[in-house]
Amino acid sequence: MKEYLMISACLLGVDCKYNGGNNKLPDGILEKLAEKYSLLPVCPECYGGLTTPRLPSERVGDRVLSSDGTDVTAQYRKGASAALLLKELTGARLALLKENSPSCGKSRIYDGTFSLTLTEGDGVCAEALMKNGVTVYGESEAEMLL
Ligand code: SF4
């Protein structure tokens, strides 16, 4: 039986990105990942009830704000909880998540100024998964999973 790999849905080509697009990985990498793992698509922002397209959001301390100042922290937390539930249901221990995202980013995220400036930090969902024992990789590290 293949091991589960949680993967940001936008990396699979699902048009769930805030602007209605995606961040699809090259076909060759996706095929190799699918050969080795059972892929579990996750989009925490969709799971949290946010629509697509939507305004971009960034973490500001413990909160997440959209570019118009709307507080979407509750939706981000709800999405992270849903991803955690998926992890509990499947026993997944690995995740490949979109870098820099306020939900999925690991180690570096945008700094809350909406100026494309990165700072140290994790997205809300990535942080929750890592706190609960999931090893998270960013898409630039995908080859490490093969
Ligand atoms: Fe991709 Fe994650 Fe953003 Fe969803 S929340 S669009 S999976 S980066």
Image: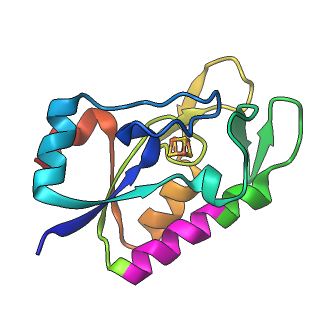
Q: Is the magenta stretch mostly helix, strand or loop?
A: helix
The structure residue drawn at horizontal position 31% and vertical position 72%, both measured from the top left corner, is: 92
The structure residue drawn at horizontal position 63% and vertical position 50%, both measured from the top left corner, is: 45
Which colouring convention does the figure follow? rainbow
Can the viewer see residue 106 in this picture? Answer: no
Residue placed most toward the observer, 57 or 28: 28
Q: Left or right of 134: which side holds 105?
A: right
User: Does residue 86 show up magenta in the picture?
Assistant: yes
Disc tally is: 0
The structure residue drawn at horizontal position 46% and vertical position 40%, both measured from the top left corner, is: 14
Part of the protein shown in magenta: 79-89
Q: Left or right of 116: which side holds 37?
A: left
Q: Measured along the vertical axis of the image, is residue 45 above or below residue 118?
A: below
Q: Quadrant of residue 49?
A: bottom right
Can the viewer see residue 119 in this picture? Answer: yes
* Residue 138 at x, y percent in the picture: 35, 41
Q: In which quarter of the image is the N terminus?
A: bottom left
Q: Left or right of 54: which side holds 137?
A: left
* Residue 95 at x, y percent in the picture: 34, 57
| Outermost residue to the right | 69
Residue placed most toward the observer, 100 or 30: 30
Q: Measured along the vertical axis of the image, is residue 17 above or below residue 71?
A: above
Q: Measured along the vertical axis of the image, is residue 35 above or below residue 87?
A: above
Q: Measured along the vertical axis of the image, is residue 145 above or below residue 142?
A: below
The structure residue drawn at horizontal position 80% and vertical position 41%, both measured from the top left corner, is: 65
User: Does residue 6 show up magenta in the picture?
Assistant: no
